[in-house]
Image (cartoon, rainbow, N blue to C red):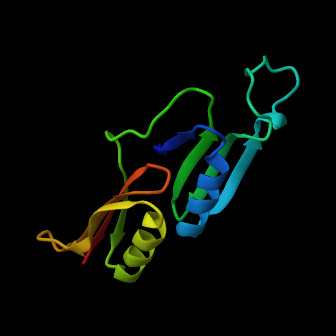
Amino acid sequence: MHVYPYLNFNDGRAEAALNFYREALNGEIAILMRYADAPKDVPSMGDIDPNWIMHARLAFGANALMISDTDRPASPSQQISLSINLDGDTATAEKVFAALSQGGQVTLPLHKTFWNALFGCFSDKFGVSWMINCQL
């Protein structure tokens, strides 16, 4: 059993987010379905742009992010942060922190902590909160 975060974006921003995360996490787009790809016999999904992403799955390592566009009002939640945990790979921690935080807002720079780790927090340019934790 696995739990994967599912990120919903407004205003057709899912594709930009998907490509940003793919590059920052060195991931692979495993699934990409647009609303136009839905079978014709499926009930109407409203007035949604057919080019928007209905469902995407980004795979990176043993992880995945699910991503879609929605016409429902949504705002980034401060109750949830995505956490990337690395064992001893400080170079990768620094690279991922720099890539994902680009254009966002760093709230706690990546630094050595009392629990013998590199740790940092930020919101990316899409407003999604992230934590990077690297055990040394």
In-image side of 105 versus 42 (left or right): left
Residue 105: where, in percent of width, then height?
37, 60
Q: Nearer the viewer, residue 65 or 78?
A: 78
Q: Residue at x 40, y 70 (%)?
A: 97
Q: Nearer the viewer, residue 2 or 86?
A: 86
Q: Residue at x 73, y 40 (%)?
A: 52
Q: Residue at x 78, y 17 (%)?
A: 43
The quadrant where residue 39 appears: top right
Q: Total of numbered circles in the picture? A: 0
View extreme (bottom): residue: 91
View extreme (left): residue: 114
Q: Against 90, is 55 above or below?
A: above
Residue 101: where, in percent of width, then height?
43, 65
Q: Nearer the viewer, residue 2 or 84?
A: 84
Residue 129: where, in percent of width, then height?
38, 51
View extreme (right): residue: 40
Residue 110: where, in percent of width, then height?
28, 72
Q: Nearer the viewer, residue 81 or 11?
A: 11
Image quadrant occupied by the C terminus: bottom left
In-image side of 114 versus 31 (left or right): left
In-image side of 90 versus 30 (left or right): left
The quadrant where residue 60 appears: bottom right
Q: Residue at x 62, y 32 (%)?
A: 70
The quadrant where residue 54 appears: top right
Q: Against 13, is 104 above or below?
A: below
